Amino acid sequence: MTELDVPGRVTAKIFPYPLNAWYAAAWDHEVTAKAPVARTVAGRPLALYRTQDGRPVALDDACWHRLAPLSQGKLVGRDGIQCPYHGLQYNAAGRCTSMPAQPTVNPSALVTSHPVVERYRYVWVWPGDPLLADADTIPDMHQMDSPEWAGDGLTIEAPCNYQLILDNLMDLTHEEFVHGSSIGQAELSESEFTTRHEDDGSVTVTRWMRDVEPPPFWLKNMRDKFPGFSGRVDRWQIIHYYAPSTICIDVGVAEAGTGAPEGDRSRGVNGYVMNTITPETDTTSHYFWAFMRNYRLESQLITTQLREGVHGVFAEDEAMLVAQQRAIDANPDKVFYSLTIDAGGMWVRRILDRMLAAEGRSLPVPSSTPSQVTS
């Protein structure tokens, strides 16, 4: 593993998206055997549905004949979908099986069927070369369906480039300024942190804030587990990045001085903020998130309260990201500067740059917009 002491060089303000990667296309409950749903993943318009035996399918959302959107059609037979315009039918492999206006089927009539895997409560789609699709490379989000964790989440349709969301999640010092009424506190910027590029290609950013006052969000959570709790806490944020766009954040607080930094979290509360961001276009993203906890698993009330509370926090992020995207669009000649706090985000950019290079899509470095690093 590698510890990054000095931030490197940013080569672009926002990145295109790799295609040879798994992206969450939908929550599992959104994809049904009753009707197709339209969803654009990495610039690919898709028609998503389930076969009668429950298997998820992702076809290009354009009929071979006149490109009418299949997602506006209906599901037919065991695994098929019918075009809403002239009635052509396709099976789950994307092969046309019926052309109502003629007795024979043109053998070239196909639409692309993309690799699909259902895991961790999401339907994942591989929009790139299907020969490279390996389900073992889907990011580890086991907390989403483990009996040892409980929680729920939502989707944000974010009108910004996916890279901006990754930047936001890899540096949480913004909580002090964007989320002052819920999870922000001055110690976020004041505390030291480490950034590591792990052997498996992931990136980990670790920050501990010792003997601090719990912000309102965490005081409420402590009192859910320890009624009447008061006092100071040790707080942690351990950010795990998995390429290209999944970030799982181990967060929590424990009664100060009870050993949480050394591994004993029994006097605390622990959650995981699960984030996986799917680029829709260059400037829009599907942002799937959930908050999972490992205490008071039986309480639906706490599940709902946490989901709504985090939803409110993330709405503050969304407002900032939208404003940032507008500022980027309005200032194409201006550059990004990077601080020490951007170390995690810098690793993410390096990894994405390598993925794009492997696809023959290396980013140009505009000579008029050199990136700058300062500390």
Image: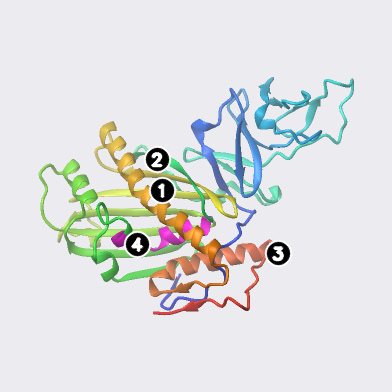
Sequence-earlier tag: 1 or 3 = 1
Label disc, if present, on residue 174 of the rendered structure: 4
- Quadrant for the C terminus, please: bottom left
Find the distance from the CA under tag 2 to the CA under tag 3: 36 Å
Find the distance from the CA under tag 4 to the CA under tag 3: 34 Å
Q: Which residue is tagged 3? A: 360
Work out whether 112 lies above or below 11: above
As helix, strand or loop, the secondary structure at mark 3 comes to loop
Residue 221 placement, left or right of 351: left
Label disc, if present, on residue 274 of the rendered structure: 1
* Amino acid, disc 1: Met
The magenta segment is: 162-177
Work out whether 244 lies above or below 60: below
The label nearer to you, 2 versus 4, is 4
Residue 367: name its quadrant. Answer: bottom right
Sequence-earlier tag: 2 or 4 = 2
Looking at the image, do the residues carrying marks 4 and 1 touch, with CB atoms under 8 Å apart? Answer: no
* Amino acid, disc 3: Gly
Find the distance from the CA under tag 2 to the CA under tag 4: 22 Å
